[in-house]
Image (cartoon, rainbow, N blue to C red):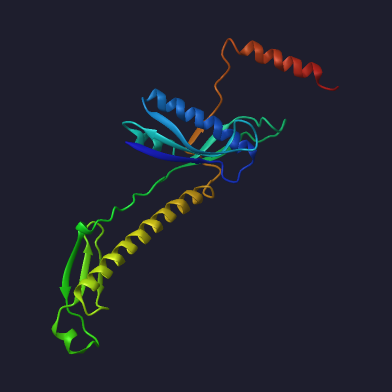
């Protein structure tokens, strides 16, 4: 089983793109712990290195759907801004939604079309009233039905009916692809700040990294203007 999850920073500031990168890595690590595989299918980079405005992630494996559900909704990365020193805001929001990446394309075959002769009303003369030259064609997989009675010959009406079925199926598939793209774009505007379904934070510094962090802090303080 596989699920596509679209993560988006929406129209948020650059910190949201930075938060998305952290949340993406956290999601991938969580998936690995659950024996799931993740693949970055599509991504739109942010204006800073190692940041993303949006990422499409494919999650594969048993339990992928439940895992994606646990990462669906408004996600929050709680940490100070790396770009604006002293900025009071610490909550940066990202939205994540399952979405359909590709839509199935209907394979059209004349063997899947049932054609029967029928009579239709309307003008056409005595011959048309006596002979069943009209055609009713049904595409069994999709259930689409067309009736053609424009010609006096059954064979011509049959040919037209098959062409009409093919065209209608192609238009239906094209409309489905357009709807899937529209739904994906809509996700970028669905980001709701506040009331997150999941809050993640940076890992606390370990015994090896804490001394380095303190040294960097002392260095910044010593070089700061007084």
Q: Residue at x 54, y 50 (%)?
A: 189
Q: Residue at x 30, y 67 (%)?
A: 164
Asked if residue 206 lies left or right of residue 131, the reply is: right
Above or below residue 38? Residue 191 is below
Closer-to-camera residue (214/105) = 105
Outermost residue toward the left in this view = 130
Which of the image's four quarters has the C terminus? top right
Outermost residue toward the right in this view = 226
Which of the image's four quarters has the N terminus? top left
Where residue 57 appears, as percent x and y from the top left, is 45, 36
Residue 164 seen in render: yes
Above or below residue 58? Residue 207 is above
Above or below residue 42? Residue 113 is below
Closer-to-camera residue (206/177) = 177
Q: How many marks?
A: 0
- Where residue 129 sits, quadrant-wise, is bottom left
Where residue 193 appears, as percent x and y from the top left, is 56, 44
Asked if residue 20 lies left or right of residue 31, the reply is: right
Asked if residue 148 lies left or right of residue 12, the reply is: left
- Where residue 10 sits, quadrant-wise, is top right
Where residue 112 appears, as percent x and y from the top left, is 21, 57
Above or below residue 209? Residue 125 is below
Asked if residue 44 lies left or right of residue 73, the reply is: right
- Where residue 218 sits, quadrant-wise, is top right
Q: Residue at x 21, y 89 (%)?
A: 125
Closer-to-camera residue (15/49) = 49
Residue 73 seen in render: no
Where residue 156 appears, as percent x and y from the top left, is 24, 73
């Amino acid at each position: 089983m596989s699920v596509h999850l679209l993560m988006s920073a929406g129209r948020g500031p650059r910190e949201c793109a930075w938060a998305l990168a952290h949340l993406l890595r956290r999601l991938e690590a969580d998936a690995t712990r659950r024996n799931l595989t993740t693949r970055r299918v599509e991504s739109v980079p942010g204006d800073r290195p190692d940041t993303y405005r949006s990422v499409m992630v494919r999650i594969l494996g048993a339990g992928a759907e439940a895992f994606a559900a646990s990462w669906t909704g408004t996600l929050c990365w709680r940490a100070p801004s790396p770009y604006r020193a002293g900025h009071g805001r610490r909550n940066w929001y990202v939205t994540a939604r399952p979405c359909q990446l590709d839509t199935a394309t209907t394979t059209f075959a004349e063997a899947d079309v049932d054609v029967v002769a029928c009579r239709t009303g309307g003008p056409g003369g005595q011959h048309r009233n006596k002979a069943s030259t009209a055609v009713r064609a049904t595409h069994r997989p999709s259930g689409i039905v067309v009736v053609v009675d424009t010609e006096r010959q059954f064979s011509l009406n049959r040919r037209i009916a098959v062409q009409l079925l093919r065209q209608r199926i192609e238009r239906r598939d094209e409309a489905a692809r357009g709807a899937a793209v529209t739904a994906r774009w809509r996700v970028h505007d669905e980001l709701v700040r506040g009331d997150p379904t999941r809050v993640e934070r940076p890992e606390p510094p370990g015994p090896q990294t804490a001394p380095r962090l303190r040294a960097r802090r002392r260095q910044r303080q010593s070089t700061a203007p007084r």
